[in-house]
Image (tube, rainbow, N blue to C red):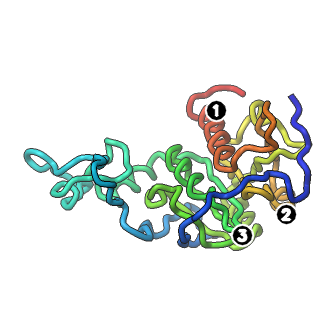
Amino acid sequence: MSLPPRERDGDRHALSPAAGSPEDTTVTGSRIGAREVQPGPHTPAGPEVMTPAEGIAQPGVGPWQGPLPEGQHWDPELLAHGDRRNVVDRYRYWRHEAIVADLDRDRHGLHIAVENWQHDLNIGSVVRTANAFNVAAVHIVGRRRWNRRGAMVTDRYQHVHHHPEIGDLLAFGRHEGLPLIGVDNFPESVPLETYRFPERCILVFGQEGPGLSEPMRQACEAVLSIAQFGSTRSINAAAAAAIAMHGWVRQHVFDQRP
C-alpha cells in the first residue's frame, strides 16, 4: 500500500506537545574518533526513585533477607535498604556500574539518532525504548538539552551522545562503518515492513512536526516509511522509533525475514 505524500508545510506531522513539560537536562558529549562508543557519566539530574503518593505501594524490593551474597556487583546500600529502581529483576541490588558493564557485553549493533533542533519532547521515550532493546547508543543531533522525564531514568544505563551538527554524526558513522537509515514518510520512502536492515547501522528520526531535516535526509543511505491505514497523517515520533527498533530486532535477533 502506497503512502500519501506528506505536505512539506507547517501542518504536516501536526501534534501538540504535552502541556507543562519539565525542565530539561544535558547529555554527554560524543567521541567522534573513538573506535568504540564510550559511555559518558551516568549520573541522573535528580534522584532515581520518586516518592510515591500516599497509599500507593512502591515498586521494587525491600532489604535483602538472609546472609548477604558475595560478589563485586552487589551494592551494599541497596542490599541494606532495598532496591526501588526501574530495572529488571536480574539486576536487583546490583551496582549501577555493574549493570552498565553487563549490558555492554551484549549490546546490539544498532544505533539510534534523533534530531533535536527545537527541544523535542519525544527523546526521553526514545531513550527508554533504546534501553529496552539494548541498542549500542543514542545520538542526539542539534541542541544538547533534552527532556529526560520520558526516559524514566533509563538514560543512566544507556549510552547517550551529543552531536552539535549533522556533519558530526556523519563523521561518527563513517568512522564506525555505520550507514544512516532515516525513518520518515516521504513519497519516495521504502516500506519499512519489506526492508532488510543492515546489522550495524544508525536509524535516524526527525523531531515531532518537521520530521527529518533536508540535510539529514540527503545524508541517509535509505529512508523508510511505516505503513498507516487510518486518517492521521503521521504517528508519534517515539512510537515510530519503537516500531523501527523492533523491526530491526525481529530480523537480527529472531532471524525473521521481511
Q: Hey, what amino acid is under mark 2?
A: Pro
* Circle nearer the N terminus (3, 1): 3
Q: Which residue is mark 2?
A: 215
User: Regarding mark 1 in the picture, which secondary structure is present there?
Assistant: helix
Which of these two is toward me, 157 or 255? 157
Quadrant holding the C terminus: top right
The 10 Å Cα crowd at callout 2, few under 14, some 14 to 19, many 20 or more, is: few
The numbered mark at residue 251 is 1
- Say if 41 sits above or below 195 in the image: below
User: Regarding mark 3 in the picture, which secondary structure is present there?
Assistant: helix
Q: Which residue is mark 3?
A: 168
- Place of residue 219 in the rendered image (x, y in percent of width and height, measured from the top left): 82, 58
Q: Hey, what amino acid is under mark 1?
A: Gln
Total marks shown come to 3
The 10 Å Cα crowd at callout 3, few under 14, some 14 to 19, many 20 or more, is: some
Which of these two is toward me, 152 or 200? 152
Q: Residue at x 68, y 49 (%)?
A: 201
Q: Residue at x 69, y 65 (%)?
A: 116
- 180 horizontally vs 123: left or right: right
Q: Quadrant of residue 124?
A: bottom right
Circles 3 and 1: CB distance less than 8 Å? no
- Place of residue 199 in the rendered image (x, y in percent of width and height, measured from the top left): 65, 42
The 10 Å Cα crowd at callout 1, few under 14, some 14 to 19, many 20 or more, is: some
- Place of residue 72 in the rendered image (x, y in percent of width and height, measured from the top left): 23, 57
The Cα atoms of the two marked residues, 3 and 1, are separated by: 29 Å
Q: Residue at x 8, y 47 (%)?
A: 67
The numbered mark at residue 189 is none
Quadrant holding the N terminus: top right
Q: Hey, what amino acid is under mark 3?
A: Asp
The Cα atoms of the two marked residues, 2 and 1, are separated by: 29 Å
